[in-house]
Image: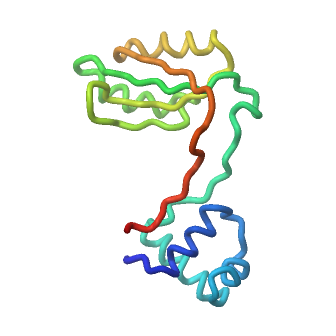
């Protein structure tokens, strides 16, 4: 499915506020509510729109630490790790990457002791490097049309 300018306008609205009604989106982009609904349904069916979600602030929810952890898996430990990582509540994002490390994770933790315990679990799978997140510089930036 190709994305025309109107689809991108609809996506911009949804990326900024997925709770907007089809009528409100229609007013903003200049088409009827049924036309918006039809285009959204097609984009959902084509998996351009993957899901709708609520974004929660980990700090406001009580977590004291947000960190980025990279893992360089030991020989033969990548596949077991890829299965195990899905069970960790601390992991809010995990990517398999190229380069010296195999994995990069974004994690939220209660405190330093929790971080230590979590790292102790990870080091059975590989060598870890941890960076503490100080602040967001770009937060949930929207996907924009290809130029």
- Relative height, residue 25 to residue 110 (above, below): below
Q: Which residue lies at the image location 58% right of the left edge and 68% below the top edge?
A: 12
Horizontal side of 20 relative to 76 (left or right) equals right
Q: Quadrant of the N terminus?
A: bottom left
How many marks are shown on the rendered structure?
0
Q: In x, y percent, where is residue 105?
A: 46, 31
Vertical placement of residue 143 versus 22, above or below: above
**Residue displayed at 26% across by 30% down:** 99
Q: Residue furthest left?
A: 75
Q: Residue at 70% of width from left, 26% of height from top?
A: 63
Quarter of the image that includes the C terminus: bottom left
The x, y position of residue 57, in whole percent, is 70, 39
The residue nearer to you, when weighing 10 against 83, is 10
Residue 74 is left or right of residue 123, and the answer is: left
Residue at the image position 52 percent from the left and 81 percent from the top: 6
Viewer-side residue, 30 vs 74: 30
User: Looking at the picture, how far across and down is residue 61, in whole percent?
Assistant: 75, 33
List x then y, in percent, for residue 97: 32, 36
In the figure, 91 relative to 12: above or below?
above
């Amino acid at each position: 499915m190709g994305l025309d300018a109107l689809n991108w306008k609809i996506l911009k609205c949804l990326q900024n506020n997925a709770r907007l009604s089809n009528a409100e989106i229609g007013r903003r982009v200049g088409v009827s509510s049924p036309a918006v609904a039809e285009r959204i349904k097609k984009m959902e069916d084509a998996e351009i729109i993957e899901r709708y979600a609520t974004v929660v602030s980990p700090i406001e929810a009580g977590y004291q630490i947000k960190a980025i952890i990279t893992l360089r898996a030991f020989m033969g430990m990548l596949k077991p790790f890829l299965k195990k990582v899905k069970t960790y509540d601390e992991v809010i994002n995990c990517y398999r990457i190229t380069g010296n490390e195999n994995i990069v994770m974004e994690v939220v933790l209660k405190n330093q002791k929790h971080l230590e315990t979590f790292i102790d679990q990870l080091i059975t799978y590989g060598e870890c490097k941890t960076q503490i997140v100080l602040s967001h510089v770009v937060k949930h930036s929207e996907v924009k049309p290809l130029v």
